[in-house]
Image (cartoon, rainbow, N blue to C red):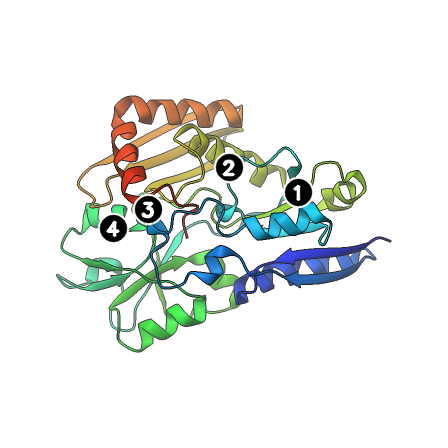
Amino acid sequence: MARLCIGSRGSQLALWQANHVSSLLRERGHEVDIEVIKTTGDKITEVALAQVGTKGMFTKEIEEALAEGRVDLAVHSLKDLPTELASTFTLAAVMKRQDPRDAFLSLRYERFTALPQGARVGTSSLRRQAQIKSVRPDLNIFPLRGNVDTRLRKLESGEFDAIILAAAGLNRLGRTERVREVLPLDVLCPAVGQGALGIEARADDTATLQELAFLDDRAARRATAAERALLRTLGGGCQVPIGAYAEAVDGALTLTAVVAQPDGSEVLRDQQTGNDPEELGMRVGRALLASGADGILRAVYGEAAAAPQQP
């Protein structure tokens, strides 16, 4: 069988993901190596993602290694992968999706609704900030960067009353001890692709693509294709206050999406159903633009210098 090299970021979660894929490939007889690659996003840890301004900040260096042939495939959190890939690359597989929702973590408060007025909440995601502020404008939102352990330490040191993290990452790492509740989708609409792993490979590497095909989950690919088409329609894979979640309902896809002012003062929502993921995503995206999302996003792009994917 082929010897394959996986390119991965060096965070605890990224390495868990790379090792998970590695174990599945080894079960099929492959020899697998993992090359850790430091990305721009890993080097800039003290600045909120919305203010960095580098597209593909968690993928660029990994794609360079892929193009050079140093690695054969890359394992990404799909929400970090820009919606438009260079023609030399392809999304070889979208793996079965885990819980796409966001988790509320706190030492003192059992539920999000129990937070007192003026409580300090940590998140560097404009998507989370906007939706939180729309229902609790009294809360104070502060930047929160770093790996999962770093973020949990900041919570436990008392720096925050609560933090918001993706449920899937906490589940994968077995770090759910501070989770008080998983927030409903109608309270906090997830990031595009949240909970799914994307496997990227060279588009002309037919042999590797064939070896990776078994990792592809049709339901996850269809759902995330709709979400990514929505994000592309709204202006690409940028660090903006956009949430989206698609799921199969009675054989068709239902896509729910949110665009919000970062301060939560305006929240636009749309939900539609269809059978073609790409068409559905574009249709919902156009509906949101027609209802005023273009104005919100123009303002955010101006302030954020079009930085990349949401955390």
Mark 1 and mark 3 lie on one chain; the one further toward the N terminus is 3
Callout 2: helix, strand or loop? loop
Circle 1 crowding by C-alpha within 10 Å: few under 14, some 14–19, many from 20: some
Mark 3: which amino acid? Answer: Arg
Q: Which residue is mark 1?
A: 216
Mark 1: which amino acid? Answer: Asp
Closest to the observer, 295 or 165 = 295
Q: Which mark is residue 132?
A: 4
Q: Are marks 2 and 3 in contact (CB under 8 Å)?
A: no
Q: Residue furthest right?
A: 1
Dot in front, 4 or 2: 2
Mark 2 and mark 3 lie on one chain; the one further toward the N terminus is 2
Alpha carbons under labels 3 and 4: distance apart: 9 Å
Q: Residue at x 27, y 51 (%)?
A: 129
Alpha carbons under labels 2 and 3: distance apart: 17 Å
Q: Which mark is residue 127?
A: 3
Closest to the observer, 23 or 274 = 23
Mark 4: which amino acid? Answer: Ile
